[in-house]
Image (tube, helix red, strand yellow):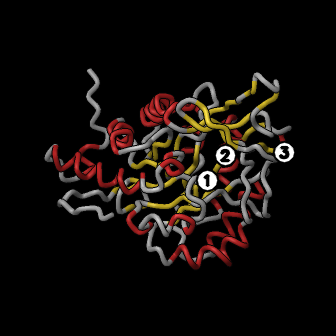
Amino acid sequence: MTIENKGVKLEVELGPLILPNPVMVASGTFGYGLEYSSLVDVSRLGGVVMKGLSLEPRPGNLPPRLVETFGGLINAIGLENIGVHAFVDQILPSIRKQNVPIIVNIFGNSVHEYVRLAEILSEAKGIAGLEINISCPNVKSGGMVFGTDPRSASEVVSSVRKNTSLPVITKLTPNVTDIGVIARAVVDAGTDIISAINTVSAMGVNIYDRKPMLGNIVGGLSGPAIKPIALRKVWEIVQTVSIPVIGIGGIVDHKDALEFLLIGAKAVQIGTANFINPKASLETIRGIESFLDSQDIYDINEFIGSLIVS
């Protein structure tokens, strides 16, 4: 499939990060990019966010780890990954050849782990930016999730910012009372960009065997069911801070993506839809281009943030 060039400018600037178009694929839904390369022309994407990386390999949670639900998917993968060193040595050289902006998602259970990840990845070649997943427990604070506490979130972001020259994206959790408070904290700590939202806390149970449907009991809900929540959260963030925001949550086609762009997100990430339709991201790019052309809009930046509120 090709994306027709109708003269519509799709390039977007997210502070120090420039993307050829605003459609990225979300962490954990596109592997390390190579897994989809036989189905998708990865070079056409605005960016690929790598599956989350930790310092050491992680096996993830015990199965079952995925549960389908009405309008969505509950996952409790447990951040399974090959570890940062294997990624740099085995994956990065190949994904660099795809000629697409590479964003590496990182996570840790302590500030030190985030810092070491940032240091290691900053020395690697071909990485366009880091996305910090702060939806992880801080083992030194009794398991409190970094992203639910402004001070913890600020400490992670500030420490990463001091140890990398790469653009820093901070991915926020929706599982907080006021996402604007967290957004302000990470902006003050030096993040360049915010991405939102991560999955919504959820669970599933089986009434016949009276057991949880996930081995981990609870997980995170993604997919179309969370789009209205994601839109609200992104809107709140855009109204609170002045840095670029990447919208995530329930996007399956160009109309969904355009809704996030309309309320002020500078780019979007497609996640669960990749499991349903591996070409969803490319179809979304083409759909955005066709829509803008039909509206006589030839620069996507004229559409971004143009919601009329009266």
Asked if one can make out residue 10 in the rendered structure from this viewpoint, the answer is yes
Asked if one can make out residue 240 in the rendered structure from this viewpoint, the answer is no
Residue 115 location, quadrant: bottom right
Is 274 rendered above or below residue 199?
below
Using the numbered discs, state the Cα–Cα distance from disc 1 to disc 3 in whole angstroms. 23 Å
Q: Secondary structure at mark 1?
A: loop
Q: Position of residue 126 (x, y in %)?
A: 53, 74
At x 68% / y 42%, what residue is drawn?
A: 66
At x 69% / y 39%, what residue is drawn?
A: 151
Amino acid at circle 1: Gly
Using the numbered discs, state the Cα–Cα distance from disc 3 to disc 2 in whole angstroms. 13 Å
Q: Which residue is mark 3?
A: 139
Q: Secondary structure at mark 3?
A: helix
Q: Which residue is mark 2?
A: 134
Residue lying farthest to the front in this orientation:
208
Is 136 rendered above or below residue 121?
above
Using the numbered discs, state the Cα–Cα distance from disc 1 to disc 2 in whole angstroms. 15 Å
Left or right: 92 in relation to 48: right
Amino acid at circle 2: Ile
Q: Position of residue 97 (x, y in %)?
A: 49, 78
Q: Which comes before the other along the chain, label 1 or label 2?
A: 1
In this view of the protein, which residue sits in the foreground, 16 or 252?
252
Q: Which residue is mark 1?
A: 28
Q: Which comes before the other along the chain, label 3 or label 2?
A: 2
At x 84% / y 45%, what residue is drawn?
A: 139
Q: Position of residue 197 (x, y in %)?
A: 54, 39
Task: Give the foreground label among 1 and 2.
Answer: 1
Left or right: 37 in relation to 28: left
Q: Secondary structure at mark 2?
A: loop
Question: Are there few (<14), some (14-19), or many (20+) residues within 10 Å of tag 3?
Answer: some
Left or right: 125 in relation to 307: right
